[in-house]
Image (cartoon, grey):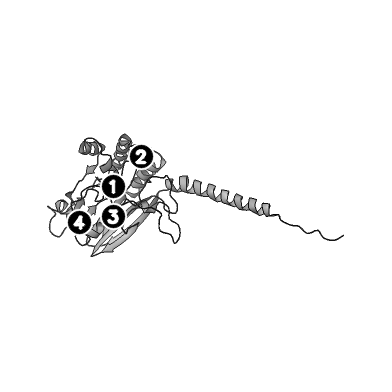
Amino acid sequence: MGRQKVVLKDWNWTRIGWGLLAAAVVFLAVEGGWIEPNSVQVTHWTIEDRLYPPLKIAQLSDLHVVHVGHREREVVAILKRQQPDVVFITGDSVGAGLHYDRVHEVLSEIAATRPPLGVWVVRGNWENWHPVRHEREFYKSAGVHFLLNQGVLLRPGVWLAGLDDPWSGHANLDEALHDAPPGAYVIALFHSPAYFDDVAGEIDLALAGHTHGGQVQLPFIRPFWLPGGSGRFLAGWYSERGTRMYVSRGIGWSHFPIRLNCPPEVPIITVRR
């Protein structure tokens, strides 16, 4: 009796292909739509510069608070563990639904971690497009400091300049630096990073957000969409004319609740001599 030849019909391969595609879609939906957006990463950086004693900074950006849930509680837990000297929030704290009451709750919890040099907030484009009523009172009642084209002596030798969002508003660095003491180490907070090309060389350190790191990063492919005001910047460190800038991937998302190969982050930046 001869051997029978087994033939795999074309429809079997078609079913296998569709099955693999379905599995990939489910994986991407779970990973990009749930796991990664709620997996907040702490990134640690050290800058060697002319500061002594060292300054430990936590940067939060693009909180886009919709619900006070796991992600927001994790951010607060990170701040408690890391114990930074100061927390800077670089815009877009409010998100879809414009739940400023929930933003207030999150900011109050962040302030309750009690960084010695306080919590400082600037506007993003969402705050300009959808302003909260009695803005200064809103932030003050949450226990955080709000800056709008203003500067303040953060500690002896360190000047903090907090700017309006350059893309949706009117940033004015000259106004924020007006009373800065000569020789001070200058940190500027603004939301949209394209402004870096205008201020590089005039400050020491800039912190920005807005891009969300692209939210979806695929190998060898530039993100499909970046908001206006991003310019040539995506995420991480940039340096020009003696000025460094860090662009945070942020905490929340824009338009679509998805992150892939681009987890939310809390950068911890230590500046020391």
Q: Residues within 10 Å of mark 4 (few under 14, many from 20)?
A: many
Left or right relative to 114: residue 19 = right
Which circle, 1 or 3, is nearer the viewer?
3
Mark closer to the chain start, 4 or 2? 2
Residue marked by disc 1: 89
Residue 196: where, in percent of width, then height? Answer: 25, 58
Q: Residues within 10 Å of mark 1 (few under 14, many from 20)?
A: many
Q: How far is the residue under mark 2 from the one under mark 3? A: 22 Å
Q: Which mark is nearer the camera, 1 or 2?
A: 2
Q: Are marks 4 and 2 in contact (CB under 8 Å)?
A: no
Q: Is residue 80 left or right of residue 179?
A: right
Report the disc number at residue 193.
Answer: 3
Give the image quarter of residue 181. Answer: bottom left
Q: Which residue is mark 4?
A: 186
The answer to the question of whether label 3 and label 4 lie on touching residues, with beta carbons closer than 8 A, is: no
Kindly indicate whether the residue at mark 3 contacts the one at mark 2 (C-beta within 8 angstroms): no
Whichever of labels 1 and 4 marks the residue nearer the N terminus, that label is: 1
Quick one: which residue is furthest to the bottom in this view? 241
Around disc 2, counting alpha carbons within 10 Å, would you say few (fewer than 14), some (14 to 19), or many (20 or more)? few
The numbered mark, 2 or 3, whose residue comes first in the sequence reads 2
Q: Is residue 48 above or below residue 260?
A: below
User: Which residue is tagged 2?
Assistant: 96
Q: Nearer the viewer, mark 3 or mark 4?
A: 3
| Secondary structure under the numbered disc 1 in the rendered image | strand
Mark 3 and mark 1 in contact (Cβ < 8 Å)?
A: no
Mark 3 is on which residue type? Pro
Q: Nearer the viewer, mark 4 or mark 2?
A: 2
Q: Position of residue 244 (x, y in %)?
A: 27, 60
